[in-house]
Amino acid sequence: MMIVRSLVAFLAIGVAAQAAEPPRPLQVLYITGGCCHDYEGQKKILVPALETRAGAKVTVIHEGGSSSDHRVSVYSQPEWSKGYDVVFHNECFAKINDPDFLKGIVAEHEKGTPAVVMHCAMHCYRAGTDDWFKFCGVTSPGHGKHYEYTARTIAEHPVLRGLPREWKVPKDELYYIDKLWPTATPLVEARSEERQAMQTVVWTNQYGKARVFGTTIGHYNHTIETPEFLGLVSRGTLWAAGRLGDDGEPTAAARPEPAAAR
């Protein structure tokens, strides 16, 4: 009987120790580079924010200089997203018009790798098909002049926790949205001065088996470093990966199996 009690106590201690282990860091693949933006500066703002706010371990792939036709090397690898919980797309390669190359990118997401798409990602990979735009959840043809605008929340969602109903976005690019795909849900809008109409600036999307969080905000560093933006994209990254509770706080319990285990 003493042996049995000792064994039970030992097992209980083991279970308690296991339960006390910290959650595995969120594995984020951050892909950036291309034309028209200070991607070096953005990387220095966003990566530390994801590490501290989302408890992430971030792997950075920064390629292409200021070109618009670079093919990010990792996309040519089989199962290129394997091992990552979420891919953060902050790139600008609008002149890649190869449908087969594009299919290799979106196929990983369609089968389940979550994603974040930010700003110029919406203008990438115009390959004569709608594959990229279906993945992003919106179709954007461009933007107007640069100006400060008011972002207005139009839905209830955990990624919006802590944000006011309205907040000022410093001088930035407000993207035109020609189409919100049926799989996407708008969360935040802003009024375009040129179109005199509301444009979606934050949304969620379901692409195949993958959650996608998207925002067109983020041209300038002074916009990206605002607490509103950093909180938004950190929660959006957690949400996409299944690690955001209904209260807008990180949770390990809700996370899906990592990509490597699929």
Image: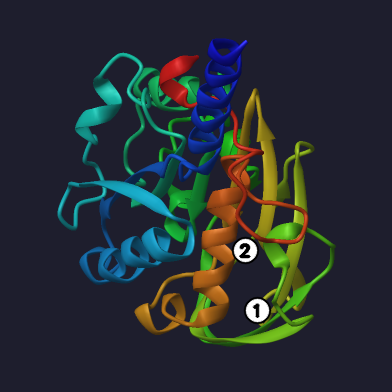
Q: Is residue 3 above or below residue 29?
A: above
Residue 194: assigned label? 1
Q: Nearer the viewer, mark 1 or mark 2?
A: 2
Residue at far right of view: 155
Q: Residue at x 58, y 31 (%)?
A: 130
Q: Residues within 10 Å of mark 1 (few under 14, many from 20)?
A: few
Of residues 50 and 8, the one drawn nearer to the viewer in this rendering: 8
> Does residue 78 appear left or right of residue 254 in this picture?
left
Q: Position of residue 64 (x, y in %)?
A: 17, 47
Q: Considering the image in quadrants, where does the N terminus appear?
A: top right
Label disc, if present, on residue 176 of the rendered structure:
2
* Relative image position of residue 117 (x, y in whole percent): 50, 49
* Residue furthest left as drawn: 65
Residue 48 in which image quadrant: bottom left
Earlier in the chain: of badge 1 and badge 2, it is: 2
Which mark identifies residue 57? none
Q: Are marks 1 and 2 in contact (CB under 8 Å)?
A: yes
Amino acid type at circle 2 is Tyr
* Amino acid at the residue labelled 1: Glu
Position of residue 156 relative to residue 173, above or below, is above
Decide if residue 240 is in sight here.
yes
Location of residue 23 in the rendering, given as x and y in whole percent from the top left corner: 48, 42
Closest to the observer, 85 or 1 = 1
SS class of the residue under badge 1? loop
The kind of secondary structure element at disc 2 is: loop
| Residue drawn 68% across the image and 42% down it | 205
Q: Which quadrant holds residue 159?
A: bottom right
